[in-house]
Image: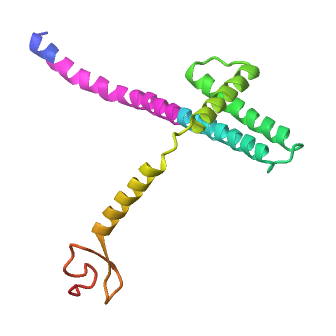
């Protein structure tokens, strides 16, 4: 066989092999995408449970939730969160952890969210607040000139004609 015929056979066989291998690559890619979507859904479920736990604690502290119902509802939410974290651990690391560890992780995440939301904001003194209000009013006055006498739509100071009906201002 000549070198040219060998190269011709290789030139034909390589694209055929690639073409035949493509479905296997697509299937692997599809499984990775579905796994990513499942991980994303589990993370969203975990965040939802954490927010629900935070709201439940807040409502219980305000007295909206009866004391006898609170432990049951809290345990149900912890169970949902633990299940979501177990599934998430199975998908990400392939290792399952015991339920006590999972529940403590949920508690830590809820405490972190609680700490972030209760961060203190320095109050403004009255002079700063008044100057902010005055500057905001000045901005608002320069933008709005009222309403069109014909159609009632809002117009700006710079408008010579109503943008809705075209009446001269």
Q: Is residue 103 left or right of residue 131?
A: right
- Residue occupying image coordinates x 53% and y 35%: 40
Residue 60 % position (x, y): 78, 44
The scheme the figure's colours follow is rainbow
Q: Main secondary structure of the magenta part?
A: helix
Q: What is the quadrant of residue 77 in the picture?
A: top right
Please state, as top left, top right, bottom left or bottom right, where the N terminus lies in the image.
top left
Residue 39 vertical position relative to residue 66 in the rendered view, above or below: above
- Based on the picture, tell me whether residue 25 belongs to the magenta stretch: yes
Q: Choose between 141 and 27: the one closer to the eye.
A: 141
Q: Residue furthest bottom?
A: 150
**What's the magenta region?**
8-37
Q: Choose between 104 and 144: the one closer to the eye.
A: 144
Please state, as top left, top right, bottom left or bottom right, where the C terminus lies in the image.
bottom left
Q: Choose between 90 and 101: the one closer to the eye.
A: 101
- Residue occupying image coordinates x 21% and y 76%: 159
- Residue occupying image coordinates x 60% and y 34%: 113
Q: What is the quadrant of residue 85 in the picture?
A: top right
Q: Residue furthest front?
A: 127
- Based on the picture, tell me whether residue 106 belongs to the magenta stretch: no
């Amino acid at each position: 066989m000549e070198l040219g015929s060998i190269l011709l056979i290789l030139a034909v066989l390589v694209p055929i092999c690639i073409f035949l291998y493509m479905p296997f690559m697509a299937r692997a890619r599809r499984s990775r995408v579905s796994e990513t979507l499942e991980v994303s859904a589990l993370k969203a479920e975990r965040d939802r449970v954490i927010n629900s736990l935070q709201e439940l604690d807040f409502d219980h502290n305000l007295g909206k939730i009866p004391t006898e119902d609170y432990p049951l509802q809290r345990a149900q939410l912890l169970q949902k969160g633990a299940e979501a974290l177990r599934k998430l651990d199975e998908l990400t690391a392939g290792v399952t952890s015991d339920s006590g560890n999972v529940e403590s992780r949920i508690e830590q995440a809820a405490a972190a969210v609680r700490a972030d939301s209760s961060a203190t904001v320095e109050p403004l003194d009255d002079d700063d607040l008044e100057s902010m209000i005055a500057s905001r009013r000045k901005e608002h006055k320069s933008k709005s000139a009222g309403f069109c006498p014909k159609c009632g739509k809002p117009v700006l100071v710079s408008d010579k004609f109503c943008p809705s009906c075209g009446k001269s201002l």
